[in-house]
């Protein structure tokens, strides 16, 4: 009973994590907002699909709000404000926005400081003039200009890449919910599905069984009967 | 820094301490402390490694791809680059008019140090003349080391 319960709980725990990710994956995919597909540094498994990479990143970013409603609106804000995303042409009406993998891609990775292309490669006139100024001595640049130049080329700083997310709370919470549901299922099962207990489990039968085992001197040296004090008729 | 060289030296030390029982387990063990089944390839010293990388970044007409490739490869190694390699890389950024990459390199090096918090301040101290000369601000100066 205990064994089957733990099996069910372990299985449900692993399935809940996949389920949660799949759930957020499909919900975000259906919004068509897969803007940043490259593998995030904190999930190094190469077997993850492109869809999972982007949604994991965006999931990490947006589960900080903690609410599904805010999640959807924040998602839209991020997608609209970032001009660095390499979207395909506007004629696309597929579920997911496919990224042209033959072009250099941008990614934020701790182990790859300089990605193949800059974050923002569509520069407006202020950006272009700043880039011109960059060709001169850097001592002439103000702090804000230097920060602006960094933000043109890169999306997240290293601390931002390494920021913790609140995803674990969702995962643990979901796990416990599934434990609870599983517990209810197991309880219902025990009540409605299991056949009645064999008659040999009853108190009276068990007492007679133990007495019989003692009479037969089962394992009298080191085991069962060895624990029984025959003289005083009690357990040692 | 040469991790392979250090490994080699570490193993030699183990053998000279006289761990006989360990030696018996090795299948290719023949004469005591005479022959070892290691590759006979020449091990690059730390100085050679550093010099190679300094030369790489010192190329006068280095292009952006080479800088990216070099930096990404260097960060991929299990070591924190020496100040002279970083100096060469920062100067390469200057030749390419790329301040953002210079700051990124400093961030990457800080991250590479991992739990050894004293490496990064040491490197910044060593690179201070270059940083002042080229006008590169550290991420701390720009307030980018905080979230």
Image (cartoon, rainbow, N blue to C red):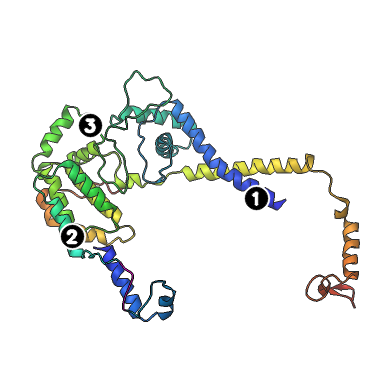
**Residue at the image point whose x is 78% and y is 75% from the top:** A222
The answer to whether B48 appears left or right of A168 in the picture is left
Position of the C terminus of chain A by quadrant: bottom right
The answer to whether B57 appears left or right of A182 in the picture is left
Tag 1 subunit: A
Tell me whether marks 3 and 1 sit on the same chain: yes
Would residue B139 be visible to someone looking at this image?
no
Q: Position of residue A148 (x, y in %)?
A: 21, 38
Q: Which residue is mark 3?
A: A121
**Residue at the image point whose x is 90% and y is 65% from the top:** A212
Q: Position of residue A169 (x, y in %)?
A: 50, 44
Front: mark 3 or 2: 2
Q: Residues within 10 Å of mark 3 (few under 14, many from 20)?
A: some
Q: Main secondary structure of the magenta part?
A: loop
**Residue at the image point whose x is 17% and y is 64% from the top:** B47
Above or below for A90 versus B11:
above
Tag 2 subunit: B
Task: Report the magenta residues as a range.
Answer: B34-38
Q: Which residue is mark 2?
A: B50
How far apart marks 3 and 2 lie (CA) works out to 34 Å
What kind of element bears circle 3?
loop
Q: Which residue is mark 1?
A: A6
Front: mark 1 or 2: 2
Pointer 3 and pointer 2: residues touching (CB < 8 Å)? no
Tag 3 subunit: A
**Residue at the image point whose x is 64% and y is 43% from the top:** A180
Earlier-in-chain disc, 3 versus 1: 1
Q: Residues within 10 Å of mark 2 (few under 14, many from 20)?
A: some
What kind of element bears circle 2?
helix
Above or below for B15 versus A185:
below
């Amino acid at each position: 009973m205990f064994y089957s319960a733990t099996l069910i709980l372990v299985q449900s725990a692993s399935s809940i994590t996949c389920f949660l990710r799949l759930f957020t994956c499909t919900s975000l995919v259906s919004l068509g907002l897969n803007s940043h597909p490259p593998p995030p540094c904190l999930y190094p498994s190469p077997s993850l699909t492109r869809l999972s990479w982007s949604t994991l990143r965006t999931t990490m970013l947006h589960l900080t709000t903690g609410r599904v409603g805010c999640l959807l609106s924040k998602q839209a804000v991020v997608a609209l404000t970032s001009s660095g995303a390499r979207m395909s042409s506007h004629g696309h009406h597929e579920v997911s926005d496919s990224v042209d993998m033959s072009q250099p891609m941008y990614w934020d990775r701790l182990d790859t400081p300089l990605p193949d292309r800059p974050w923002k490669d569509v520069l407006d006139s202020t950006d272009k003039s700043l880039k011109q100024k960059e060709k001169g001595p850097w001592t002439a640049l103000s702090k804000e200009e230097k920060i602006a130049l960094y933000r043109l080329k890169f999306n997240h700083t290293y601390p931002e890449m390494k920021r913790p997310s609140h995803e674990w709370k969702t995962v643990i919470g979901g796990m416990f919910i599934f434990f609870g549901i599983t517990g209810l299922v197991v309880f219902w099962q025990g009540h409605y599905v299991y056949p009645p207990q064999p008659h040999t489990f009853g108190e009276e039968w068990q007492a007679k069984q133990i007495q019989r085992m003692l009479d037969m001197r089962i394992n009298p040296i080191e085991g069962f009967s060895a624990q029984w004090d025959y003289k005083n008729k009690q357990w040692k | 820094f040469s991790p392979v060289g250090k490994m080699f030296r570490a193993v030699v030390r183990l053998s000279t301490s006289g761990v006989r029982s360990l030696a018996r387990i090795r299948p290719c063990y023949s004469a005591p402390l005479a022959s070892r089944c290691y590759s006979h390839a020449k091990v690059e010293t730390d100085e050679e490694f550093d010099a190679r990388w300094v030369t790489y970044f010192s190329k006068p007409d280095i292009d952006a791809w080479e800088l990216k490739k070099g930096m990404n490869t260097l960060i991929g190694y299990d070591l924190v680059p020496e100040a002279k390699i970083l100096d060469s890389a920062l100067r390469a950024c200057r030749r390419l008019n790329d301040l953002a990459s210079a700051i990124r390199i400093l961030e990457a090096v800080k991250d590479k140090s991992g739990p050894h918090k004293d490496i990064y301040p040491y490197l910044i101290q060593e690179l201070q003349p270059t940083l002042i000369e080229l006008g590169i601000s550290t991420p701390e100066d720009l307030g980018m080391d905080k979230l």
